[in-house]
Image (cartoon, rainbow, N blue to C red):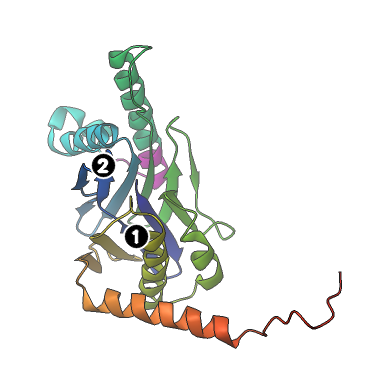
């Protein structure tokens, strides 16, 4: 399984992903799910992946080839003029890859080859933008009403993001919020696992402000995890007590 989050702030974009993939409890591996490309002074792009590993790796490999092969530069993410057109191209490639994989395996082929993506980035002279790309190739864009996207195992970490998110929050607070969201997901689902990849893209700065892998032994993450657990227990014990003797309405 997977858990990835992309978030829009006034100051820019924050992304975090886990790295665990598994095909049963006896086959667990670590694979990167966050990828980025940049042209200094012009653009920074990032992509996070969830779903069938062969499908997502094929999509990333094709995108990488297009950034290197001159004959395909017209479809390169590094030369498309807008983030919308980048999203269109990524969606098209994802759809084609899924269709090809399913066709190669035939109607009776085993396995599910679907995948979904979070695309984030900024091109010079334009706003930072965040997209959620579906397996069918279509996509939606983050807005004031929907300022963050999740893919993979979303349900455990979502309530924390909804309660804690503020568009004006600092990058540091956004990272802390994401860590709490990931910690809750890690504890609830063993198919999501460390290490975590973190990327912070500041508005109008076309190099990553912060790009780091967070290992399971990271002291700050351990402190966040322990402090969050203590805070939850303290909050629970501070709630009014229930009494079997008191009269209950309803």
Q: Position of residue 180 (x, y in %)?
A: 40, 70
Of residues 168 and 2, the one drawn nearer to the viewer in this rendering: 2
Q: Quadrant of the C terminus?
A: bottom right
Can the viewer see residue 128 in this picture? Answer: no
Q: Position of residue 120 (x, y in %)?
A: 36, 52
- Total labels drawn: 2
Contact between labelled residues 2 and 1, with CB atoms less than 8 Å apart: no
Does 14 sit above or below residue 54? below
Find the magenta span and give its range.
80-87
Give the structural element (helix, strand or loop) at label 1: strand
Q: Give the foreground label among 1 and 2.
A: 1
Is 85 on the left-hand or right-hand side of 193? right
Is 31 on the left-hand or right-hand side of 190? left
If you read the primary sequence from the N terminus, does the residue marked by circle 1 or circle 2 appear first?
Answer: 1
Query: Mark 1 sits on what residue?
Result: 15
Query: Mark 2 sits on what residue?
Result: 79
Magenta segment includes 84? yes
Of residues 53 and 140, the one drawn nearer to the viewer in this rendering: 53
């Amino acid at each position: 399984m997977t858990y990835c989050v992309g978030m829009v702030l006034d100051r820019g974009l924050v992304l975090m992903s886990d790295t665990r993939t598994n095909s049963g409890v006896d086959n667990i591996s670590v694979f990167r799910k966050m990828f980025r490309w940049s042209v200094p002074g012009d653009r920074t792009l990032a992509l996070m992946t969830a779903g069938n590993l062969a499908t997502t790796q094929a999509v990333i490999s094709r995108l990488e080839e297009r950034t290197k092969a001159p004959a395909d530069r017209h479809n390169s993410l590094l030369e498309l003029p807008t983030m919308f057109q980048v999203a269109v191209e990524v969606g098209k490639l994802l759809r084609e890859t899924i269709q090809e994989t399913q066709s190669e395996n035939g109607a009776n082929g085993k396995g599910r080859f679907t995948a979904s993506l979070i695309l984030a980035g900024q091109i010079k002279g334009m706003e930072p933008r965040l997209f959620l790309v579906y397996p069918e190739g279509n996509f939606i864009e983050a807005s004031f009403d929907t300022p963050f996207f999740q893919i993979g195992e979303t349900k455990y970490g979502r309530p924390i993001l909804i309660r804690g998110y503020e568009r004006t929050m600092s990058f540091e607070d956004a990272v802390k919020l994401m860590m709490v969201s990931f910690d809750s997901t890690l504890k609830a689902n063993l198919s999501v696992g460390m290490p975590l990849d973190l990327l912070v893209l500041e508005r109008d700065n076309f190099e990553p402000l912060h790009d780091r892998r967070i290992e399971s032994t990271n002291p700050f993450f351990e402190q966040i995890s322990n402090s969050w657990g203590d805070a939850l227990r303290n909050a629970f014990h501070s709630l009014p007590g229930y009494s079997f003797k008191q009269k209950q309405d309803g």
